[in-house]
Image (cartoon, rainbow, N blue to C red):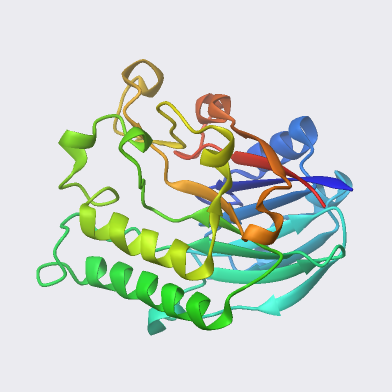
Amino acid sequence: MPFTLATWNINSVRLREALVAKLLAEETPDVLCLQECKSPVDKIPMEQFRELGYGHIVARGQKGYNGVAILSKQPLRDLGDKDFAGLGHARHIAAELENGVTIHNFYVPAGGDVPDREKNEKFGQKLDYLAEMRDWFASERPGKAILVGDLNIAPREDDVWSHKQLLKVVSHTPVEVEALGATQEAGGWVDITRKDIPEGQLYSWWSYRARDWDAADKGRRLDHIWATPDIAGAGHDSRILRAARGWEKPSDHAPVFATFDL
């Protein structure tokens, strides 16, 4: 049976409850993975989501920071979480669907403003986080799994509005791109979005700093959907709901979708 999955950095699920409800009502994904929920789990506003058919949730939360959640129409089995780099942050959660597919939902650290671990502790934490992800996937070699989330890196030249101008900007530096590539390779992950949309500029994030983000279009593809090789061929119909970036009081991220025939 096919199912559609979406991933979205919501930038506060309580502040943007109405936007989550709008997405669920209009797009009706079977599974929605959220990042940067900025809420303890017991404060996530589930009542409206349940009324829309999303009665199942697996989540980890913190007050005001980080936080990841998986909302689903079908039952989920909580598979736990990993505290990569020992940060004590709610940045990862895993759950299993009834069809046996494991979903990993990640919120990788942004890394601060200076791409130098000696000058910027946050950048070092980001690289350490990715290194531990890489090592874990290398040892686990996951199967029948989907990895989604705000990975805070735009790996390809056409994943940013200007490759040349962003080479020294955190999220597109060569060291970050290399680290993400090593993590992807360690798990054998296939980038489903780029499998379906192999050519052309593609973004999922536009800064709040741009007055007219749509016209300026200085975006980056920071949000990803990957799958293990055994099910990557079942993934299709990838898209980014750019229009959501223009909703009232939006997140600076747009939701990313893919459908899997599993």
Q: Left or right: 219 with respect to 145?
A: left
Where is residue 55 drawn, in percent x and y? 86, 57
Q: Is residue 91 visible?
A: no
Q: Is residue 126 above or below residue 135?
A: above
Residue 213, quarter of the rendered image: top left
Q: Left or right: 55 with respect to 210?
A: right
Q: Is residue 88 visible?
A: yes
* Residue closest to the eye, 251 or 7: 7
Q: Left or right: 106 with respect to 146?
A: left
Q: Is residue 75 above or below residue 81?
A: above
Residue at screen point 29% across, 59% down: 178
Where is residue 203 drawn, in percent x and y? 43, 33
Outermost left residue: 119
Q: How many marks?
A: 0
Outermost top residue: 215
Residue 94, quarter of the rendered image: bottom right
Residue at screen point 45% across, 64% down: 185
Where is residue 72 drawn, in percent x and y? 79, 55
Residue at screen point 36% across, 46% down: 154
Q: Left or right: 56 with respect to 120?
A: right
Where is residue 11 drawn, in percent x and y? 50, 49
